[in-house]
Image (cartoon, rainbow, N blue to C red):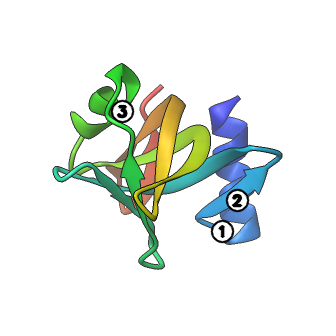
Amino acid sequence: MVSVMFWMLLAMGMTAWAVDEMVVVMGKVNAGGTLVTEVGEVYLLHLDDKGKEVMSHSPKTVIVMGRLVEKDGKQTIVVNSYQVMEKTSGQEESDS
């Protein structure tokens, strides 16, 4: 499911979009608990178990599916699922 969404993101030239209350965001994980998209949008990761799992993949690029909430005036993603992307031969490619 996430792989299909990844290709949709690339085809649409987008790094994030919302569907109902869920979001899908592709960006680089930073050790400070943030996800930064290619266009510089910064999202905080909610540091529950899934958020900490995503953080453990710093500094890789990931696709995160989750719920977008405002926490202390900042965009925060409560992670439902994610996929780590690996660079091979200059292109992003799925872990799986």
Q: Secondary structure at mark 3?
A: helix
Q: Is residue 18 left or right of residue 48?
A: right
Q: Is residue 52 above or below residue 38?
A: above
Q: Quadrant of residue 28?
A: bottom left
Image quarter in which the N terminus is found: top right
Q: Earlier in the sequence, mark 3 or mark 1?
A: 1
Q: Is residue 42 left or right of residue 5?
A: left
The percent position of residue 92, horizontal first and vertical second, equals 45, 53
The percent position of residue 63, horizontal first and vertical second, equals 51, 45
Q: Label 1: which residue?
A: 14
Question: Nearer the viewer's eye, disc 3 or disc 1?
Answer: 3
Residue type at mark 1 is Met
Q: Pick whichever, 48 or 64, lies toward us.
A: 48
- Which residue corresponds to the image point at 42% horizontal and 32% vertical from the top-left? 95
Q: Of all residues shown, which one is farthest toward the front? A: 72
Q: Label 2: which residue?
A: 17
Q: CA distance from mark 3 to mark 2?
A: 19 Å
Q: Pick whichever, 26 or 20, lies toward us.
A: 20
The percent position of residue 66, horizontal first and vertical second, equals 59, 37
Q: CA distance from mark 3 to mark 1?
A: 22 Å
Q: Is residue 89 above or below residue 81?
A: below
10 Å crowding of disc 3: few (<14), some (14-19), many (20+): many
Q: Label 3: which residue?
A: 51
Q: Quadrant of residue 22?
A: top right
Q: Are marks 2 and 1 in contact (CB under 8 Å)?
A: yes
10 Å crowding of disc 2: few (<14), some (14-19), many (20+): few
Q: Earlier in the sequence, mark 3 or mark 2?
A: 2
